Image (tube, rainbow, N blue to C red):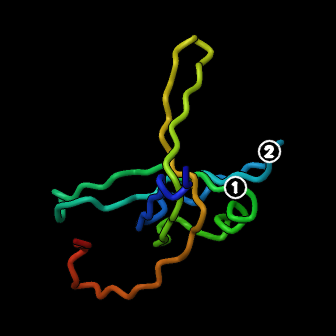
Amino acid sequence: MSVYNNQVKLFGNLGKAAEIVESKAGTVARFNLAVYRSGKGDEAVTDWIPIVAWHDLARGAAELDKGARVIVTGSIQTRSYETEDGVKKYVTEVIAREIGKDISIKKDDEDEVPF
């Protein structure tokens, strides 16, 4: 089965700078990406998508500041873990394969409607 059966591309803004951690498995960066869904002004709907990047990609994510407009390509992963209380929790996140700055130019008076 091809890895391309599970592929996602997201355009959004970093909610805050990536958290970078050195682990036994390597360098990992975690951040939430604010992705516009629909609406305008007070009616705007934004989804907060958790992103995980590993190794060199994680080190590169350290260069991105809060609010940076980026494009993330990767795959969706769902995992579970058990808390100290014995409660099973599920997490869905995007494992990034590519992260790049979105350098498209937007004028201040343009509507932010991607569709």
Judged from the image, the secondary structure of the residue bearing numbered disc 1 is strand
Q: In the picture provided, is 37 more to the left or to the right than 98?
A: left
Q: Quadrant of the C terminus?
A: bottom left
Nearer to the camera, 26 or 64: 26
Query: Is 92 situated above or below 72?
Result: above
Picture mark count: 2
Closer to the N terminus: mark 2 or mark 1? 2
Where does residue 8 sit, x and y in percent of width and height? Answer: 44, 59
Labels 2 & 1 near each other (Cβ < 8 A): yes
Crowding near pointer 1: few (<14 within 10 Å), some, many (20+)?
A: many
The kind of residue tagged 1 is Trp
Q: Residue at x 51, y 64 (%)?
A: 73
> As rendered, which of 55 and 18 lies closer to the eye?
55
| Callout 2: SS | loop
88, above or below 111, in the image: above
**Mark on residue 25?**
2
Left or right of 36: which side holds 30?
A: right
Judged left or right of residue 20, residue 8 is left
Instruction: State the residue lying farthest toward the right.
Output: 24
Please name the residue shown 57% across and 52% down the image.
95
Counting from the top left corner in percent of width and height, residue 89 is at 50, 24
Other-residue count near label 2 (Cα within 10 Å), few / some / many at <14 / 14–19 / ≥20: few
Q: Residue furthest front?
A: 1
Residue located 30% across and 55% down the image: 46
In the foreground, 107 or 89: 89
Q: Which residue corresponds to mark 1?
A: 54
Residue lying at the far top in this picture: please name it. Answer: 86
Mark 2 to mark 1 CA distance (whole Å): 9 Å
